[in-house]
Image: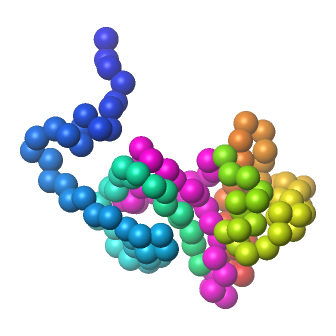
Amino acid sequence: MKRPFNAQTFLDSSGLARKITEYRRGDVVFAQGDACTHVLYIQKGSVKLSVLSKAGREAVVAMLGQGEFFGGKHDKPVRAVPPVSQETLAEMVGTTRSRVNFFMKKFQRLGFIDYANGLKVNNSLLTVVLHD
């Protein structure tokens, strides 16, 4: 019987080339367009994944936390978004919770997001944001 993958056991194993780096709140791990040749693992804290439109507007596509991997190359953007309150979203983008609620309902009505079984962002929303 196969045992489930344990990231910490994997990271603790000998022979792995690894480097532990600490980042402060607001530090950029890598920027959009930079080559990413490593897979990164979050031991503690969180990471915000965002993209910039041509007009310079930022769209948060995922919030990652302790125990998650990121980096490398993905064919598709991350679609599932971890649970996050509208208050937290409002703080992230610098607006009010009621304004976030207004746009969440509008995005759902337009088919850009889905609330069934957690928040899922459809690729169409990312296309609209990135080709502003």
- Give coordinates of residue 40: x percent, y percent: 34, 56
User: Where on the picture, by quarter, is residue 129?
Assistant: bottom right
- Give coordinates of residue 29: x percent, y percent: 39, 70
User: Where on the picture, by quarter, is residue 113?
Assistant: bottom right
Q: Is residue 25 left or right of residue 17?
A: right
- Our reading of the magenta stretch's main secondary structure is loop
44 lies above or below 56: above
Q: How is the image coloured?
A: rainbow
Residue at the (62%, 66%) spot, across then down: 60
Q: Residue furthest bottom?
A: 55
Q: Is residue 55 magenta?
A: yes
Q: Name the foreground residue: 79 vs 101.
A: 101
Magenta-drawn segment: 53-82
14 lies above or below 132: above
76 lies above or below 51: above
Q: Name the foreground residue: 43 vs 80.
A: 43
For the image, the number of numbered tags is: 0
Quarter of the image that includes the N terminus: top left
Residue at the (57%, 72%) spot, across then down: 51
Q: Is residue 97 left or right of residue 38?
A: right
Q: Name the foreground residue: 41 vs 55.
A: 41
Residue at the (87%, 68%) spot, across then down: 99
Q: Is residue 26 magenta?
A: no
- Give coordinates of residue 49: x percent, y percent: 53, 64
Q: Residue furthest top?
A: 1
Residue at the (86%, 59%) spot, across then down: 101
Residue 127 appearing in the image: no
Residue 45 appearing in the image: yes
Q: Name the foreground residue: 68 vs 113.
A: 68
Quarter of the image that includes the C terminus: bottom right
- Give coordinates of residue 59: x percent, y percent: 65, 71
